[in-house]
Image (spheres, rainbow, N blue to C red):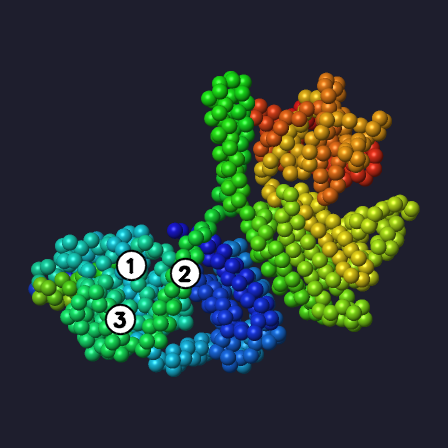
Amino acid sequence: MSTEASFSQVDLRIEGELTIYRADELKRALIEPLSVGIRLVVDLAAVTELDTCGLQLLMLAKRTASAVQAELQLVAHSPAVLEVFELLNVAAFFGDHLVIAPSPASKG
Amino acid sequence: MNLDQALLIFIAESRELLEDMESSLLALEQTEDKTELINSIFRAAHTIKGSSGLFSLDHVVAFTHVVENVLDKVRAGTLPIGDELVATLLLCCDHISSLIDGVQAGQTEANEQSNDAGEPLLAQLHAVLGTPVGASAALVAGADRDATQRIQAKGKGTGSDYWHISLQFGPEVLRNGLDPLSFIRYLTTLGRIVDILTVPDRLPLAADMDPEVCYLAYEIHLDTAADKAAIERAFEFVQGECRLRIVAPNSRMEEYIRLIQESPEISERVGELMVRCGALTRQELDTALSTQADSVPQRQIGAILLEQQAVPVEVVDAALQKQKQVKEIQAQESRSIRVDADKLDQLINLVGELIIVGAGVKLVARKAGVADLLQKTTKLAGLVEQVRDSALQLRMVKIAATFNRFQRVVHDVSRDLGKDIGLVIAGEDTELDKTVVEKIGDPLMHLVRNSMDHGIESAELRAARGKPAQGTVRLNAFHDSGSIVITVEDDGGGLKRERILAKAIERGLIEAGHNLNDTEIYGLIFEPGFSTADKITNLSGRGVGLDVVKRNITALRGNVEINSQEGVGTIVTVRLPLTLAIIDGFLVEVGKSVFAIPLDMIEECVAYSAEPGHNYTNLRGEVLPFIRLRELFTVSAPITRRENIVVLKHMGKKVGLVVDTLLGEFQTVIKPLDAVFDQVKCISGSTILGSGDVALILDVPTLVHEATAGPGAAANASASSVSDMALAA
């Protein structure tokens, strides 16, 4: 996982599993930037697995963002993420632009 | 629940389903209204497919899927079901069952062998379906489309055409290593998820949120042919950890409304989802909710909707009926539980030990001579006896399952033989020990096949003899004085007494001129290497079999007898003990050795008397042959007082047993004898007395046989070695 911060935007790239095994770490990484009210861009291209716990954290981040008037943007969804989003029909919840092609494309 | 256990349950359930499927298939021929049976066959195949999917047993799913497609067409009435198809489907049953066997043996993927076995069947099924062999995938899509169309076609009822599943997982599921996602993924194997709503409303603020707690809930619309139980089964692993509400397609609006009311925090969303899926129209939802708010609290929303003519009356009635059925099934399920056979065995063992120790305590109490203690131990003994009886009762199963297997055997074999044979079953409610049930299957199979192959004559011969064209094999079971009796009867040609006799003499089994009664002569066919069949078929007639039958039955402490009338039929009677573990025994003493006799074989006890110089006595005018145990086991201790005769009865024959002392009743825990003592006659096992001494259990059938076979025959050399063993033990 790598975080890159600029003046008004934090770029977070999550690599590997987005699952319960890293729940605490992920929660901190997702929520802390938002709590200071800036724009968070999460790159999901390297996510190999997404479970309910991970999805829940993304949803939490989205809600937190709208509560504090910050912004959360998910980009470059990996196939593993897309599969779950599609199965659970949550794409609309996040409102991000999805690239349907399985290959991780450039920023949306 | 770990997966291994779940897999075991899956295997057990699949076997049951396959049995159901088989019996339903067999019953099809005789039933007028086939709808119910076809439905149950379809359900069985469908459930097996669904559960196999849960365990990723793709090869089982693939094969069962094609079977299911065929059954679906039969169900829809587009495919007639005849003898040929029934036979094919029976083979498919067998194949699935062998796949399940493979799964049990740890083989979770298809291999060449199973493919080879499955392919010809698949080819047949595809031929029936009229689709090319490799077209399974296309078939799937086609079948799904069919289903969808069907649902849409009947969509004139009220409400949605889809199942509505409202699912809320408990907070701990994630920590317990379960992922709700996998359950939803599994649902897609049952059918198509039409719409799904992931509800994050329970998510707390970021600061209060524990990332390992599950907050999400789901509202799902599912398009599936599966029934409610199958959907519920998908969530079996999280039972108790999730709130699951399933609303059937075309349910009453009340159901939906109630669902909405039960989950207030998400009610609006659910309502919207229903509107989106067409379960309710927006107007209906608004009207129903607002009317309810206005009206007096006792008024049900269903009633309101009815008044407004929103729901046709018959739909309400039908739905009520359906709910009632579901409830009844659930009530039935909760009445029985599945228990590991090993646990039962352990219980029986413990009860056995309890009996032995109990007998020891009784002995001590008697020695101590304390009246209170004696009274209590007597009460205790009574209770132990009850515990024993109910523990043994737990192991008792009905013989119906074993008998019903023979429907299939008779169906198949009669096809093979080209004979028209029907099976008549009686006494299928008779209960017997599970171990006995398991072991009696094969011997019975042999007997039934034998009856069909050799017993029942060809159609022409039957016609010539004035018998009905259809031959009949009868299976019957009943209880008779501590044993269970199973009979296999046929109305065929019967045994040819003279030919058996001639053959036996030719084989050197008996000597010419030996006088035998009918039963003894017919009994000869159970001797090793004996077969009178003129031609050998692949079913029987090779001279192996009947002796194995006899050996198996004898190993269960049972016996077999045959009776026949030439041209009329044959009846084979198998007699087995009810249980193999604990019996009521009667103790007798000879010298210093104690012997146990199964109580239900004892007719009475009388004081010793004998016709001078003979081994028989006069029992109320009857001749009663007897055996002196002292001689049989060469007990050397001298006779100290007046002897007694125990009168044994077995299979209608009475025999006396001369003993020294009668010690009374004793709960006998049967301990098997070591293989070393296999050759010892007249002893069937041993038991431990309260004092810790060993007593031998007498084998009454053998004793009776020996005593009635001829004077002096009983006291043979092999028996005489027993006395040393008894004393040493």
Which residue is rendered at x = 65% and y = 66% of the image? B411
Q: Amino acid at mark 1?
A: Arg
Relative height, residue B137 to residue B584 (above, below): below
Query: What crowding class fits label 1: few (fewer than 14 Cα within 10 Å), some (14-19), or many (20 or more)?
Result: few
* Front residue of B437 and B666: B666
Q: Would you say B493 lies left or right of B79 here?
A: right
Q: Is residue A23 above or below residue B48?
A: above
Q: Name the spot of residue B539 as percent of width and height, x first.
A: 72, 61
Answer with mark 2 or mark 1, whichever residue precedes in sequence.
1
Residue A7 lies in what quarter of the image? Answer: bottom left
* Disc 2: CA contacts within 10 A as few (<14), some (14-19) or many (>=20): few
Please provide percent x and percent y for residue B175: 28, 52
Sequence order check, earlier mark of 3 and 2: 3
What chain letter is assigned to the residue under label 2?
B
Residue B302, disc: 3
Are dots 1 and 3 in contact, CB under 8 Å?
no
CA distance for labels 2 and 1 = 21 Å
Q: Decide: few, some or many residues near mark 3? Use Cα within 10 Å; few <14, some 14-19, many ≥20.
A: many
Cα gap from disc 1 to disc 3, whole angstroms: 23 Å
Specify whether B694 is left or right of B34.
right
| Mark identifier at residue B328 | 2
Residue furthest out toward the right:
B513
Whether labels 1 and 3 share one chain: yes
| Location of mark 1 (residue) | B243
Q: Residue shown at 59%/56% (left/top)?
A: B428
Query: SS class of the residue under badge 3?
Result: helix
